[in-house]
Image: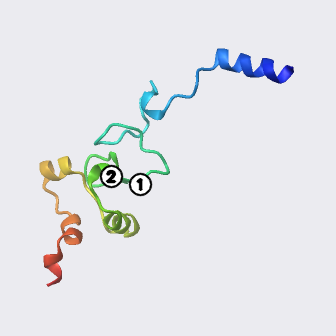
Amino acid sequence: SKRGKKQNRKQDKTPPESPPELEPDEPSYPCGACGKEVNDDDDAILCESGCDIWFHRACTGLSQSAYGYLTSEENAEWICDSCYTSKAISLTKPKIASPLNSN
């Protein structure tokens, strides 16, 4: 049947779709921590005050609530650990993480 021929031809010419990790292309937005592509539907955050690189939320160790706060508050800026260490910019993260401030 025609359909059978089409399927066979497709299998011969196009390799099966490879998972994102195996793509030879450089990722457009590689995660600054793991190096894998940061996709539109991933929880990801930009190091706005520092290196301007995207990071997966999971790779940064941010909790879901801290991530939600940082991405919803216009004035809240997140900075990655390496920029934080090298630039020692004051960070919004300790305010969220530290319960001591509320006492």
Q: In the rendered view of the protein, which quadrant contains the C terminus?
A: bottom left
In this rendered view, identify the residue nearer to me: 26 or 9.
9
- Occupied quadrant, residue 3: top right
- Which mark is drawn over residue 43? 1
- Check disc 2 and report the residue beneath it: 58
| Residue 78 seen in this snapshot | yes
Disc 1, SS = loop
- Answer with left or right where residue 102 lies relative to residue 65: left
The residue under label 2 is which amino acid type? Ala
**Identity of the residue drawn at 30% across and 52% down:** 47
Q: Is residue 5 left or right of residue 85?
A: right
The answer to which image quadrant residue 77 occupies is bottom left
Please state the horizontal and vertical placement of residue 28, each as a whole percent of the image.
44, 36
- Location of the N terminus by quadrant is top right
**Residue occupying image coordinates x 13% and y 55%:** 88
Where 30 falls versus 45 (above or below)? Answer: above
Is residue 6 left or right of 38 when viewed as pictured? right
For numbered disc 2, what is the local secondary structure? Answer: helix
Provide residue 38's location: percent of width, then percent of height: 42, 44
**Earlier along the polypeptide chain: callout 1 or callout 2?**
1
Mark 1–mark 2 contact, CB under 8 Å?
yes
Farthest residue, direction bottom: 103
Image coords of residue 34 (percent x, y): 31, 39
Q: Residue at x 79, y 21 (%)?
A: 4
Count neighbours of disc 2 (C-alpha within 10 A) and say few if under 14, some if 14 to 19, many if 20 or more: some
39 or 52: nearer the eye?
39
For residue 82, above or below residue 103:
above
Q: For this view, does 97 lie left or right of residue 70?
A: left
Whether residue 46 is visible to the viewer of this picture, yes or no, is: no
Q: Please, is residue 73 above or below residue 41 in the view? A: below
In the image, what residue type sits under mark 1? Asp
